Amino acid sequence: FFSRTFFFNMGPPSFGKGKGKGKGKGKGKGYAPEGPPEWMKTVGEFMHTAEDLMVCKLILEPIEIPQFNAGIWTAEKAQIGKVDDVFGRVNEVYFTVKTSDGVSASSYKKGDQVHISTEKLLPLFRFTRPPPGKGGGKGKGKGKGKGKGKG
């Protein structure tokens, strides 16, 4: 339970488009740089470079898809870069990594493993199953009902 003084100290309620706390112009989400994740999984193997990007093959079993802009790390928890794109077939997934400043994609060799935070992976069914309740089935139409009035 809250005390009565708690509610009196909250100030007037804000309704509609009034000036509320924390919603001013020019205040976007400030993204703090992420530190190394506490829990990581080996997500892929480096294949080759393409236009300053690292192309990696997903090696997770069961297949989980990395989120866009998720940090990619070495086994020693040094950041390599961020996921730029995910592509390929459902059973053969690839992703590209845009390297961070000071990291060269050409410094890695084929087969080098890359890692990702366990919190930055999405299950495969999010991309393969249709959303529930969308499309299909019969809708309730107006149909032919009894007429109104005399006749």
Image (tube, grey):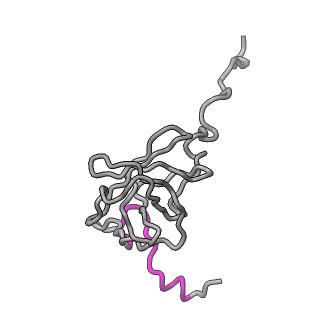
Q: Is residue 7 magenta?
A: yes
- Residue 20 position (above or below residue 52): below
Q: Magenta part of the protein: which range?
A: 5-21
Q: Main secondary structure of the magenta part?
A: loop
Residue shown at 60%/45% (left/top)?
Answer: 125
Question: Along the line of sight, which residue is nearer the eye, 25 or 102?
Answer: 102
* Quarter of the image where one finds residue 5: bottom right
Q: Quadrant for residue 81, please give it.
A: bottom left
Quarter of the figure with residue 132: top right
Where residue 95 appears, as percent x and y from the top left, is 43, 48
Q: Quadrant of the N terminus?
A: bottom right
Is 124 a magenta residue? no
Apparent side of residue 103 relative to residue 7 in the rendered image (left or right)? left
Instruction: Give how far across and how far down residue 149 sits, in percent.
Output: 70, 18
Q: Position of residue 120 (x, y in %)?
A: 50, 60
Of 35 and 106, which appears nearest the observer?
Answer: 106
From this view, report whether residue 106 is shown above or below residue 149. Answer: below
Please report the residue visible at 59 percent of the width from the left and 41 percent of the height from the top: 131
- As displayed, is residue 125 above or below residue 150? below
User: 114 or 14: nearer the eye?
Assistant: 114
Is 31 drawn above or below residue 105 in the view shown? below
Which residue: 61% across, 52% down? 61
